[in-house]
Image: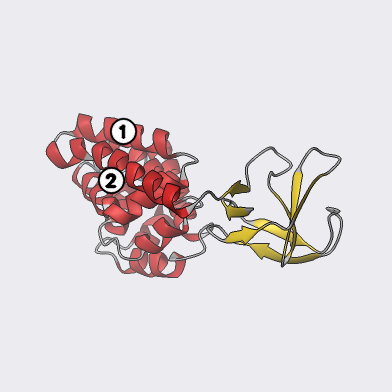
Amino acid sequence: IRFEVLRRAALRKEFDLSSAQVGVLEIGEIVESTQQKVNHLGQTRIKTEKGWTSVEARDGGVLLVKKEDDDLDERLQAKSDEIVASLFVPLRTFADDEAVAEACFYAVKSLLVGSNMLKKSVARSGSLDIIGEALSEHADVAGVAAHGCETIRVVVSQCKAVQKALKKAEVIVPAIAKVLEIHAASEPVIASAFGCIEECTVTTSAGSKAFLQTLASAELDGIYLVDTVLK
């Protein structure tokens, strides 16, 4: 049985959780199980060629999911692409309407939480640029600024495809810098912006260096703005 890794998972030498760690499975990896057992905590543990790992975390979160046949994956991804395309129609059609932008950001971040397939569709469709353009256009509106930054954080979280696409999304970083400049005195908005920056740098496995370099070289120096806000 094949599994896809949804969250970074430790590989251990033996079935026992206390055995030596021999590696880590990264998000997006596909592994094949040669043996499955349930431990005393109720966790399903699988043996791979690299070592033992858990299907579920101790907190109940899903680490690995069964990988079905590629044909089904392709059909599901195609349907996911359709859903994401429809989600962004309002932003494309009513780009100058701040109420539409705020509502769309709220819908996107709510729907995409925990769905790597939908997030991959965002990366495949180039929708990161649409998010950045809408955020930049309405950065002066607190609701749009907060929901826009939270949307970016959610989309980037634990999705390697989006993290890679982030390096090519030219408007995301300047939009975040704009939010920092306009809302320096607004704690709720700044909290959203900082959470977004953290997800794009500290917790991603790809694109973090490029993100920071772009943030520092933006027309509005994002690193300087972060420092100013903190002071």
Side (left or right) of 44 relative to 2 = right
* Residue that mark 2 sits on: 182
Local SS, label 2? helix
Quadrant of residue 39 in the image?
top right
Q: How is the image coloured?
A: secondary structure
In front: 161, or 166? 161
Local SS, label 1? helix
Percent position (x, y) of residue 207? 43, 66
Q: Amino acid at mark 1?
A: Gly
Distance from disc 2 to disc 1, alpha carbons, whole Å, reads 13 Å
Within 10 Å of disc 1 (Cα), the crowding (few <14, some 14-19, many 20+) is some
Within 10 Å of disc 2 (Cα), the crowding (few <14, some 14-19, many 20+) is some
Side (left or right) of 14 relative to 130 = right
Q: Amino acid at mark 2?
A: Ile
| Count of residue discs | 2
Residue depicted at x 69% and y 43%: 56
In front: 149, or 180? 149
Residue depicted at x 34% and y 42%: 79
> Can I make out residue 153 in this image?
no
> Can I make out residue 135 in this image?
yes
Q: Relative to residue 86, is residue 5 depicted above or below?
A: below
Between tags 2 and 1, which lies in front?
1
Percent position (x, y) of residue 191? 45, 42
Percent position (x, y) of residue 37? 80, 47
Percent position (x, y) of residue 164? 40, 63
Q: Are marks 2 and 1 in contact (CB under 8 Å)?
A: no
* Residue that mark 1 sits on: 143
Residue 204, which numbered label?
none
Q: Relative to residue 30, is residue 148 depicted above or below?
A: above
In front: 191, or 112? 112
Mark with earlier residue (2, 1): 1
